[in-house]
Structure formats: C-alpha cells, structure tokens
Image: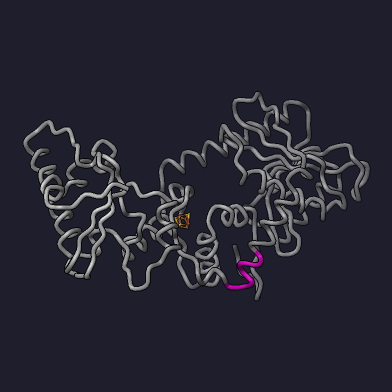
Amino acid sequence: MKLVGNSVELSASDLVGFLNCPHLSALDRAVAKGALPKPKVWDPLLEILRERGAAHEQNYIEHLRKAGLEVARIDGVDVTQQEIAQTLAAMTKGTAVIAQGALEHGGWVGRADILRRVEVASALGAWSYEAIDTKLARETKAGAVLQLCLYSDLLAQAQGIAPEHMYVVVPWSDFEPQKYRFADYAAYYRKVKRALLQFLADKQDEQTYPDPKEHCDICRWRVDCDKRRRADDHLCLVANISKLQISELKQRKIPGARVGTVDKFQGQEAPIAIYSTATSSHADAPRGMEFLYSLNRLNVATSRAKCLSIMISSPRIFEAECRTPRQIQLANAFCGFLEMARTLSL
Ligand code: SF4
C-alpha cells in the first residue's frame, strides 16, 4: 500500500492481506500515511522460502527459454511508469514470455511473475496474454488465486479483453501449470476488492483490533500485535480458549462484568468471581500441570470474590493422574476446593 498524492495505491498483496486480516490493512495504511514505521521482522525461515521462491521462478523461466520461447524481463521491483511502458511495449511486440510484467489500472498495480502470450485476438493484435504465478505451496491458497485475478483484471484493461485462464506453477509438477478459469473466481475477487475499498473509504481501519488469525504465524506485524494483546490482557491468552468461546464472551456482555485471564484480576475484588477453565483435563493442558494447577492462580481466581466464588470446569480436571509428589501437591489444592464447594452438574 502506497500513498500517491491523496489516493492510496493498492497491490495484490494488499488484497490478500485484507482477506487474511483487516487489521493488517489498517496497519499497512498507517505505514503508508507515515503514522507508523515499517515493521522490522526478520525470519530466517521466511527468508529461505523467499529465496526458494525466486529460484523456482527462475527455473521456470529457464524451462520456457529451453522450449524455444523468447523471454523479456522487466527489471526493478516497483511499478513505475517506465516499467509499465516497457511491459506494454513487450506486449505490443507480441513477446512470447514477459517476466515480472508491470501493470496498472484505477489505483491498482501488480507485477505478475509471468505473462504468457496466447493466440487469442485482442486490442494488441492476433494475440493476448494470460498470467502465471510460480508458487511453492503444495496446495494453492485462495490468496494465490485472488492475486492472479488482479493480474488478469489488469491485463484485461491493458489488452482490451479479459484473459480466459490464469495459472499456478508449483515445483514438483515438471512445470505443468495448474489451470484456473478467471470467470470462475472473478465475482468473488471483485467482492473482496470492493470490501477493501469500502473499508478504507469508511475509515474502518481506525477501529480494528489484532484478534488472532491463522495468518499471525507468518505475519510481519506479529510482534506488534502480540505486544498489544498482552498489554490488553486479551482473552486469547487464556490457555486452550477457542475462537468460539472468545466470540461468545464478547457477544454476551453482562453489564458491569469484567472478563480476562486470571492474571488480570490480581489485587482486585468483586461480589461474585467466576473462574472458568478452558482446558478440560490435565492431559490437555498446553502449558503443563504446573500452569494449570498453579496454587497462585487458583488462589487469585477464587479468593477475589467477596460473596460467591464459582468454578466452571470439566469434572476431569479433578481427576489428575499424579506421578510425582509435586503433582499431588498441585492437584491437592483443586481437590481441597472441590471438598469445600457445592457441586452442580450441568
Ligand atoms: S499479526 Fe495477526 S492480527 Fe496482527 S496484523 Fe498480522 S494477521 Fe492481523
């Protein structure tokens, strides 16, 4: 995402980023506006994947060259007027393969890995182009197809006709492209595009929150988002809590009730304290028995109540199979609580 004058210039990675997480689009817009610095995340694994991706693209280009096809490479990494003009010149000439072709229309830009000539008439002449992306993933992701949809859309503007197909080439395929029909994905692509433009126009980016997503593991913003969730004591920090439980708790807001991890309630009191364990048994505890049965945490969870302390959990949590004296000591506090409590089965 780039600010050009008063408008935002968007690319395929902005479209895919929005599909993965609207908060990511909000942070990227803040960078474009100069309100935030670019995140500095260096992940050696992602670096290796990037290098392998570049090598795979290069191998595919060599494969096409060996097949006798003329290849024109558009240098650079951005989409400047010069690179767009070079791409259009190569398309007008009818070059068989254009690597890293730069395209632009209506505030959207893209650099397709490969533009391949097909013998379908267009405004260029008796030929036109279709987009190919080289990918490493075993299973083609929705984002890869959306990316190709943007390139196909931009190609349609450049050559006056929408390409019929778009392709993904993966490493183990002997360079045999996987074929996707643009029309089968185009309406959904346009819907995501409209949603992103609406999101930016309505300034919804000012209200997003970094709720955890599948994409967080590889996101360049993960360090900042994690810091913010910790500072806010976000519910995702409750061990084993599910997305469904978080959204139920958010939706069923009880007036005056405070919800958070046990740690958040250190030093606080309330008439009623409800302690709900997201983990069902000691065997499921992702952070081990020491954490689940921690005496300090049980103490905070149950002693903050002035009148009534309620614990909601699976009965299996009281059936820990202890192998060491330390484990008995940990489970002992829960068993003591059970002896004092009135048990209700739901
Ligand atoms: S780290 Fe997760 S929440 Fe934050 S921007 Fe990335 S995907 Fe969104």
Residue 199 belongs to the span the image colors magenta:
yes
290 up-or-down from 206: above or below = above
324 up-or-down from 215: above or below = above
Would residue 100 be found to the left or right of residue 296 on screen? Answer: right
Q: Range of the magenta residues? A: 197-203
Kindly identify the residue that appears in the image at 71 percent across and 64 percent down. Answer: 107
Residue 288 belongs to the span the image colors magenta:
no
60 up-or-down from 133: above or below = above
Kindly identify the residue that appears in the image at 73 percent across and 34 percent down. Answer: 179
Spot occupied by residue 143 in the image (x, y as percentages of width and height): 61, 46
Kindly identify the residue that appears in the image at 59 percent across and 62 percent down. Answer: 1
Would residue 308 be found to the left or right of residue 346 on screen? Answer: left
| Residue that lies at the very extreme toward the top in this rendered image | 174
157 up-or-down from 6: above or below = above
The majority secondary structure of the magenta stretch comes to helix
Q: Quadrant of residue 175?
A: top right
| Residue that lies at the very extreme toward the bottom in this rendered image | 6
Kindly identify the residue that appears in the image at 28 percent across and 58 percent down. Answer: 261
Q: Nearer the viewer, residue 249 or 289?
A: 249
Spot occupied by residue 75 in the image (x, y as percentages of width and height): 66, 49
What number of labels is visible?
A: 0
Spot occupied by residue 142 in the image (x, y as percentages of width and height): 62, 44
Q: Quadrant of residue 114?
A: top right
Q: Nearer the viewer, residue 108 or 126?
A: 108
Would residue 201 be found to the left or right of residue 225 on screen? Answer: right
Would residue 15 be found to the left or right of residue 67 on screen? Answer: left
What colouring method underlies this structural image? one colour
Spot occupied by residue 282 in the image (x, y as percentages of width and height): 23, 39
| Residue that lies at the very extreme toward the left in this rendered image | 325
